[in-house]
Amino acid sequence: MLDIPVVISGGGPVGLAASLFLSRHGVRSLMVERHPGTALTPKARGINARTMEVFRQCGIDEAVRAAGLAEGGTGLIVWTETLAGREIERRVPGRAIAKNMAVTPGKNCLCAQDDLEPVIRRHAEAAGPGELRFNTELTSFTQKGDSVTGILTDRTTGAGTPFTARYLIAAEGAQSRVRRALGAKMVGEEKVYDSVNILFHAELTQWVKDRPAALYFVEQDGLRATFLTINGRDRWGFLIHSPSKYGWTPENFTPEFCIDLIRKGIGVPDIPVTVLGVSPWQASAIVADRYRDRNVFLAGDAAHEMPPTGGFGLNTGVQDVHNLAWKIAAVLRGKADESLLDSYHDERQPLATITTKASLANAMSMGRTENKAGVLPRREFLNEQGLIFGASYQSNAVVPDGTPPAAIDDPVTEYLPSARPGSRAPHVWLQRGSEQISTVDLIGPHFLLLTGAGGEAWQRAAQAAAPAWPPLVARTIGTDTEVGDPDGKWQLAYGIDADGAVLVRPDGYVAWRSRSGVSNPEASLRAAFDRLLGRVAAMA
């Protein structure tokens, strides 16, 4: 009988990231994946800047970037009649303009999933104490009391191993066995449109080198499709939009048929093309009605399925488990009440609902259910700064400070940095010795107390009030401190006086803020921890 604190079912990017994040919190886990190894096809490709911040905090962002397309390999979105023919339009995605890039130290990255997964796997295996076990599948589970029991089956031998765990994270993808067993209801629009992904080799450099793009949309009356950049040279995806509108079924997509379509999209009838794989699929825009069922949590595509228009699926999933990992660790260490885990649903499910609806709106604006050529997307497409950075959590893991949310005309596209509790801790460039760092670089597997130059009392309070777990790191930001603010922007960005303080959670979101000094900072800090960790009721 295996006895493990956390079992993770599913070893895609979300399951691998969950293992890595839990290990960084010192939590022993076992990730099981039914396939013999990491992904063999590109699948998701775009990693947005918020996810790159998460990877930066884990020290793997440079490895991810090295595994992906070199910087400068994309930068545009292009619409054409054919790749070699007339160009209809080109755009610079809103995410890539200087104003939007200035809010983060981490740039977007294009790294295909079959290149990304080995990077996360390597670091997860090195991190420990998490264990990864491939070719193994969760075949049954039951919940009883404060544990989950079940069977893990070796897919080669058929041998089953019983296990007991405190928690189970289901990161199994859209066909999640765990989700179905829980009876979670998926809310939204299912099977909205159909698509076919074709992975192929062809040398296309001459038509893309002067206009590097992540996406090349092909707009013809008889074919609407997208060339998906993978390495920018000879490895590509070709996404056929709504093939059923042309009377095509998955059975039609033989290698010969695929080659003909690809050549039609390129506009060169005799170019050598090798088809590597064909994957029919249907887009849905649905979100689970609950992310937590007692000791079981849904994450990634098991919790939400969204159209790929905007590239939010993988990113939302990785950020799901980043939100969840520190909370599980706090409860397992006995430093937080079980009620803290309710905040996972309260924070992530509403955001996924908004993101899924926006992804569907992107798709519909591009005529994904039609076969009419030349339909360009709404202005929000690839300009969703508000969705990427602007989440404003409301849960029992946030202590409000009484300030109202900022007035924003369009929460999808607009992001106004704020340290109001529940918001992502804003990025500000700071100085540590001769090194320029971001506030994001101070965040790690610990709570972070940031104080102004006059925050000595908060620093003393942090030493006295720091719980054994989660660990608490305190930093003073000022002109004559270890971490300097040479541009004088930090205090304004975080909305505090010189004697104020901000408490940032391990996932990079503000948990609590005191805009100025108080008479008893130690009591104030202890009260904040007791409230956001659910210890108030327990103490009472």
Image (cartoon, helix red, strand yellow):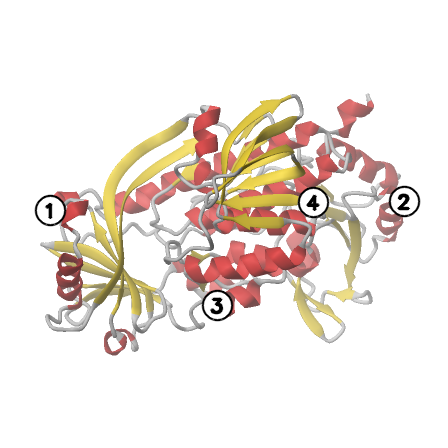
Q: Mark 1 or mark 3, which has the lower sequence index?
A: 3
Viewer-proximal residue among 207 and 39: 39
Single out the mark in the foreground, 1 or 4: 4
Provide residue 52's location: percent of width, then percent of height: 53, 59
Dot 1: few (<14), some (14–19), or many (≥20) neighbours within 10 Å?
Answer: few
Q: Inspect the image, locate mark 3, and give the three-letter code of the amino acid beneath it.
A: Ala
Q: Mark 2 or mark 4, which has the lower sequence index?
A: 4
Helix, strand or loop for disc 1: helix
Question: Which quadrant: the C terminus?
Answer: top right
Dot 3: few (<14), some (14–19), or many (≥20) neighbours within 10 Å?
Answer: some
Residue drawn at 45 percent across, 37 percent down: 302
Q: Is residue 75 left or right of residue 450?
A: left
Does residue 329 lie above or below 372 as drawn? above
Helix, strand or loop for disc 3: helix
The answer, for residue 520, to whether it is visible in the render is yes
Spatial CA distance of label 2 from label 4 is 25 Å
Viewer-proximal residue among 170 and 240: 170
Q: Is residue 283 left or right of residue 179?
A: left
Q: Inspect the image, locate mark 1, and give the three-letter code of the amino acid beneath it.
A: Tyr
The answer, for residue 53, to whether it is visible in the render is no
Q: Please give the label number shown on residue 27.
A: 4
Spatial CA distance of label 1 from label 3 is 37 Å
In the rendered image, which residue does mark 1 sit on? 246
Label 1 with label 2: CB-CB less than 8 Å: no
